[in-house]
Image (cartoon, coloured by chain):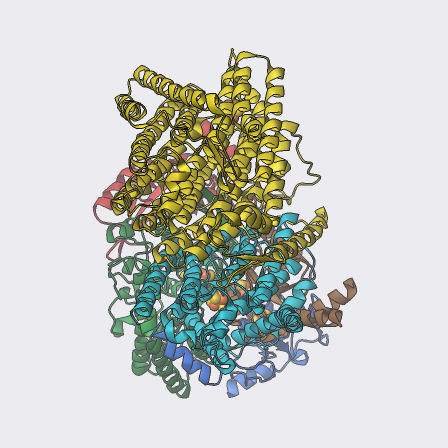
Chain colours: A brown, B blue, C green, D red, E cyan, F yellow
Amino acid sequence: MIKDFIEKSRAKSPWMVHFDCGSCNGCDIETLACLTPIYDVERFGVVNVGNPKHADLLMVTGAVNHRNKHALKKIYDQMPDPKAVVAIGACGLSGGVFREAYNVVGGIDKVIPVDVYVYGCPPKPEAIIDGVVKAIETFKAKAREAA
Amino acid sequence: MMFMTPHILKNLFQKSATRMYPLEQREPFERARGELAITVEDCIFCGACARKCPSQCITVDKKTATWTLDPMACICCGICVTACPKNCLQQELVYRRPCTEREQISRQGEIRRRPRKVKPADEEKKAA
Amino acid sequence: MSKMTIPFGPQHPVLPEPLHLKLVMEDEIVTEAIPQIGFVHRGLEKLCEIRDIHQMIQVVERVCGICSMIHAMCYCQAIEKQMGVEAPRRARFLRVIWSELHRMHSHLLWLGLYADAFGFESLFMQLWKIRERIMDINEATSGNRVIVSVNVIGGVRYDIPPEQLSWILKELGQVEKELKAIQNTMLNDYTVKKRTVGKGVLDKATAYELGAAGPTLRASGWAQDARQLRYAAFDELDFEPVVETAGDSYARGAVRFRETLQSIDLVRQAIDKLPAGEINVKVKGFPEGEMVARVEQPRGELLYYMKCDGSKHLDRLRIRTPTFANIAPLLAMLPGCQLADVPVIVLSIDPCISCTER
Amino acid sequence: MIENMYSISVDEIVGQAGRMKQDGYRLVTLTAVDLNEHEVDLIYHFDRDLKMKHFRVNVTKGRKVPSISAVYFGAVLVENEIQDQFGLHFDGLALDYDEGLYLEEEAGRTPFCKYGVITKAASAKAITD
Amino acid sequence: MIKDTLLVLFALAGAPLLGGFMAGIDRRITARLQARFGPPIMQPFYDVAKLFGKQMIVPNSWQVFCAYVYLVGAVLSVVLFFLQSDLLLIFFVQAVGAVFLVLGGMAVPSPYAQVGAQRELIQVLTYEPLLILVFVTIYSVTGSFKISAIYAHEAPLLKELPLIFIVLTYALTIKLRKSPFDFSTSHHGHQEIVKGVLTEHSGPILGLIEVGHWYETVLILGLCALFWATSPVGMIILITATYFAELIVDNAMARMTWRWMLGYVWSVGLAMSVINIIWLYAK
Amino acid sequence: MPSLLLFMCILVPIIAGVLCYLVRIGFARTLTVLVTGAVLTAGSLMLLGHGTFTYVPPSPWAGLVNTAITLADFALLAIMFGIARKHRSKLIMTLVVLQAVPLLFFELFMVDHGAPAPGFYGDNLSLIITLLVSIVGSLICVFALPYMQKHEAHLHLKRSRQPQFFFLLLIFLGAMNGLALSNNIAWLYFFFEVTTFCSFMLIGHDGTPIAVKNALRALWMNSLGGVAFVFGMIGAHHIAGTTDIQQIIASGPMGGALLVPLALLCLAGFTKSAQVPFQSWLLGAMVAPTPVSALLHSSTMVKAGVYVIFRFAPTFAGTFFSQGLAIVGSFTFLVTIALALGQRNGKKILAYSTISNLGLIIACAGINTPTALAAGILLIIFHAISKALLFLCVGTIEQEIGSRDIEDMRGLFAVKPRIAVITVIGIMTMLLPPFGVLISKWMAIEAASNNLPAVGMIAMGSALGFVVWGRWAGILMSASYKKGLKPEPMSAFVNGPLSVLAGGAVLFSLVLPWIYSLLVKPMLAFAPYQVHFGSLDSSIGGFTVIPIFLILAAGFVYALKQAQKTRARHVAPMYMSGVHSGGPDDETFRGPMNKIVQIETGNYYLTRLFGEERLTFWVNNVAVALLVLMMGGAL
Ligand code: SF4
Ligand code: SF4
Ligand code: SF4
Ligand code: SF4
Ligand code: SF4
Ligand code: SF4
Ligand code: SF4
Ligand code: SF4
């Protein structure tokens, strides 16, 4: 019974940490906007904990450049399992309009595994909420696999 | 402290400002620049969209009549839509839903051998 | 007394963007703050070599996703000027409307983050709630909430129909009402003042000497606003730069708060005077030569330098953003403050690392 | 064409900056423009009451340029940026990131020099020469 | 004896439920105050359950030790509270928890946790004398430090010690980590020192701390309730009103700095205590 | 029987000291110290078993002893005068003369040498002191054996000065026991002076200029106390007409007439206990080798001061003077711990904390109710044990890492786990329930709760103490994970005393209810607390000592079990905003200009608020004012 409750809780309490990996801010601000009254992702139990050690979800925006890719990796590694990564925006997905710039690695999945891709430049907050919901699903599946 | 208190108390006793997405969904705005869609039947594979696209995320292969979009790189600017001489591109009102796998969108049209005589799209434009 | 050396950022909950500061402190008093940047540097100025001048509009819009429209506007105005075309009058008014909308949402966003930096969560929520109205206006008029992509060389892409204009006025009235309701909290609350008054003081002379820009400069007593250059339709609109003299975080906050109200007024004026007519002119060919253009962004004076040789690619694009100019004043403000004031002071210049590093 | 553009030589930079400061000018920024394999234009932009003055300095690549960060501290970041992107070297920088302001090793060096990349080693050599 | 056993059991099992429930309501009301819809009331329980289901990652074993001792201290103080023992004793036992929370924060030289621990110490420094003074004044009214004596007292303490009650709420605000005193760690992460003392705690260990925090909430609200010990309804009203006021204050103020807190709370707290005591003697 | 035991407690250490001085062989010295320790321990325990007693040496001896002591008194004063002359200290010369002349007058014209001189008296108070001196003191002497060897090795001394050192150390113990057990106020004065002299010699032991300077300061301040003592003694004799301490006490305040001499005696106690404004000599004493500090702070010197005050406390119960004492004591408690907060020198922190605790003890004496006295006596016991332990810990750490700065002790656990853990235990016993110091503090607060200014200051002081101790304990354990940590080796003479003291601090706390009912309760006018089920209980409050002890112990053990399950695979690097540079035990990050930066963390010392330079001036002035007020109250 306790196991079940933990299982259920996992889906109901995704704490997030947001890392701006070289975004133009468009996506960051939309991610932040999800926390604010109109969208209020706390309805789903999401709390912006700001600390990878507490987080279940890593929300990454931006095109990933050669400097912050190290930080991205480290933050990901510091998150305890089970965890999921949501890549937000064209930049996070592929490097977007900056793909060819010299300092851009291009796409978060080149550095860490990504579970959910959220399209848009920037995605609407609704899309980000969809992404979170999707992440919760993948994340349940992951926990089941691990068990 | 005194200044904010009436404000938050008002919030408490009002309905919350939250839009209960996804339970409640708002009508999208008319101009919303959502997912890019192609009516591939009308496409003449001229490549204008591919050339104009600031993100260079469309590839058009005239020979095989394929129109390919890398949605992951599309920045939803709508430049291609304006550029298309055939008006066969359009941005839907809703955005593309998040996914869990990388994907490419490839549309196969029919390979036209002869150059067309009539340009229906152009005519429409003139009429308008 | 003992020394602490801590890494502040790049991933840090009070910094929405990656910036690293090595802070050395004694009993939480900062004695040394050295920045490490480059976490957002993409090198997008270099993209002008592979994107033509029209495509570059979309790229410069993404220098920053907050005042994106203003970047594009500056870029287009520069090229228009160089090529001797003038955008139609209606387009210029529409540019003013959108750019002031951007200023408003940018300031509201910033005021929220600023409130969050001194731990006033409900104020943050309130401000961002108000901001959503502006985001709705953006989306309704352009199809995207943030990056509106309205500029083209020679004018604007979209027109705003009359029924939308009146709706915008209604929404702005609401924004104004709600802003006035929290004006007292923002400007007179004891705790807010306690956390901001006298923090990170930048005196008048230093502000000028270090090349501060925008509200950071105006909060130190300089009435300098690039909109006084009367670009777009500003030559037909009434406004006075908003100035404060204290030069501290509070003053910078107050400048931005008042500027938000000022922007509402400017949009109203622009809608009022909005002429009928075309919204863009066709532009043929490519510019040649060197050019410099300036506009006022939410964070201050933005400068574009471009050099082109008549081909469809620019030879050199250089963007000097106000936040870049404000980093040096920031470094001057930090030493001597408390750790708890670091986020407040850092945010008080409204840093935008994205446009700082491009 | 840019109004109020004056050409000066490398050695005049610091003196000119000092004069501008005395005249109550604010440093807006510096711009570097790659001209060809050997030369870079450095443009110093100043402003007073929204009127700008620009000074163009033609510099040979690899050569040291005196930093004006002692006069205008605000120049520090720009000069560092130019070091990163153009491989020029500024002498007397108040904070020297040594070509590492933006760039990691992976990103290569002097990305803005279209006409030839200057390696760090080469530029270091040029300095010692 | 049976009554005592029941009380102990209630303290052990009921307190965390109550504390978690309070936290849930807290988050919901906070959300409403901010014009948000807010999480479900059960959210704190989901959070803790999830934390217990997470991978164990710690910086070292000393932190684990400290977290457990913190919990033991918190639980024991609540048990003692329900057994109506000596107020000072309860407070000192609670201090065991407080010390180990700080030690847990200092378990590694992590900058944010260290700063948090230092600030936590300063918070303790701020509220400890106030609490002792509160207890001493209670003693001067009831003639004993024992909680049982408060129940035996015929009038609500609130009537005689209104200012002291306010002093107690200062301590309460600090303990609950509410604005303007939420600097050693805060419920949400938007803070210059990330999560302060708790930065390095994660997963199950963080869960333990959270549960300990629920116990502490119950303890401190219990202390408030003592000021209207004559009627159970009064106790409930008092707790509700205090907690609500707490939430309003939390949302109507910026976070202050600890330097300000130390000066402000000490001076105002001491002044209020003194005035109340003089008033008491004058009567 | 008492005669033998008194011999064991007072004379044996003195003889042993002389032996140490004469026989300059290391091995013999070790043996002597060990044997003396055993004898002292046995003697004091047996004395305790013997219970309250009065003992006057049989007829010829009594007179002889008295004469010998009187002569020794003058000899001592002469030596001190000589020292003062050598160091050209007019101040000390004056103070010595101010003692010698009245003393001469006293001995020649006042004391009736015909009457039988009072001898020794032992009640629970003196027996407790004797016990502490004998056992804790001996442990410190044992600890000093290896310590001094290392110490001299560090100093590269050609000729060992250990004989003299142990000579003084052992004499010190004997004198302390003599002081505690004498019933003759003149003898008490003599032993009082011996401790002054020994401490002077020991502080100056290393002979460095700073040591000499600090030793001289200790000498003048304590001589000031000596002067106060002499006048107090003369006054008391003048009014009560006897040198028998018990009789003086029995005569009561005599309508306030006796208050002035008593106040002077208390003033002597103040200097000896280094209360503000006399704290500087004890702080200066830090220059001495650590065993000296341990001895001065825990069981001897400073306890001599509070002993004197406690001894005479019943006499002035209920007077305004007593009230004043309570205020002055709690003031000292508050300000010295505040001074400790601004310190990062481990020994200084301990020193300030000692003064602070003594202040609390004195405040208890001032409050002067049975509860307060019980609190004071328990505090004397537990403070002595814990403080001795902590000093020895700091001494050991200092020899291991070469610093006494607590910032340098950061992460000590990763290097020297054994001493780190023992130190943490020591700190816990100073700070937390269910340990004795805290229980006594609890009692003190309850006792003081009728005296609002006092209880206010105690409340603030204890909060400051929380910070002082909490952060120190935190520092010691603040280390990244290290695999396969092994306790460092430790010599038996170091480990032994440390373990005994640590064990003692814990175990005695467990049996506190019985210590209270067996030792403390009989001294009091009425019993403030009832003991049942291992709990202290009264109408105003209760402390369930044993149950809490057991539950917390169980909690500790469980927590330890859980902690031990931690394996390397659980360990993650600490959070550094994503720029940490390496593995789990790495404490660096990649900072500006891509340089690797070592993180530094430090405690807050709030030097702007609690700095020594800032606070001392005010503290001293206020203290002087308060003292004047208090003495005025006696008039
Ligand atoms: S996807 Fe678009 S909005 Fe998001 S960071 Fe990239 S450019 Fe900015
Ligand atoms: S639209 Fe017509 S002219 Fe333009 S590229 Fe296509 S085929 Fe050529
Ligand atoms: S919307 Fe913009 S980015 Fe997307 S395909 Fe069209 S032109 Fe390219
Ligand atoms: S521009 Fe239109 S017609 Fe031409 S390839 Fe693109 S979609 Fe097809
Ligand atoms: S300042 Fe820069 S980042 Fe900020 S909104 Fe303007 S362009 Fe964008
Ligand atoms: S500083 Fe830049 S990234 Fe941060 S909120 Fe402002 S604009 Fe956005
Ligand atoms: S106390 Fe601080 S962290 Fe907690 S809910 Fe309030 S604002 Fe958020
Ligand atoms: S470190 Fe210790 S033993 Fe060595 S010389 Fe100093 S005090 Fe003596």
Residue F322 located left or right of residue F444: left
Q: Position of residue E93 (x, y in %)?
A: 55, 58
> F54 or F601, which is in the foreground?
F54
Q: Is residue F298 visible?
A: yes
Residue lying at 50% horizontally and 40% vertically, measured from the top left: F123
Residue F505 located left or right of residue F612: right
Q: Position of residue C250 (x, y in %)?
A: 31, 62
Q: Most extreme residue toward the left, as rendered?
A: D23
Classify residue F196 by image quadrant.
top left
> F449 or F258, which is in the foreground?
F258
Classify residue E210 by image quadrant.
bottom right
Residue E37 located left or right of residue C328: right
Q: Is residue A94 visible?
A: no
Q: Position of residue C55 (x, y in %)?
A: 50, 64
Classify residue E163 by image quadrant.
bottom left
Q: Is residue F287 above or below residue F413?
A: above
Q: Is residue F365 above or below residue A56?
A: above
> F227 or D61, which is in the foreground?
F227
Which quarter of the image is occupied by the N terminus of chain C? top left
Residue lying at 38% horizontally and 71% vertically, measured from the top left: E161
Q: Position of residue C89 (x, y in %)?
A: 33, 76
In this rendering, the count of numbered labels is 0
Q: Is residue F525 above or below residue F189?
A: below
Residue lying at 37% horizontally and 25% vertically, measured from the top left: F114
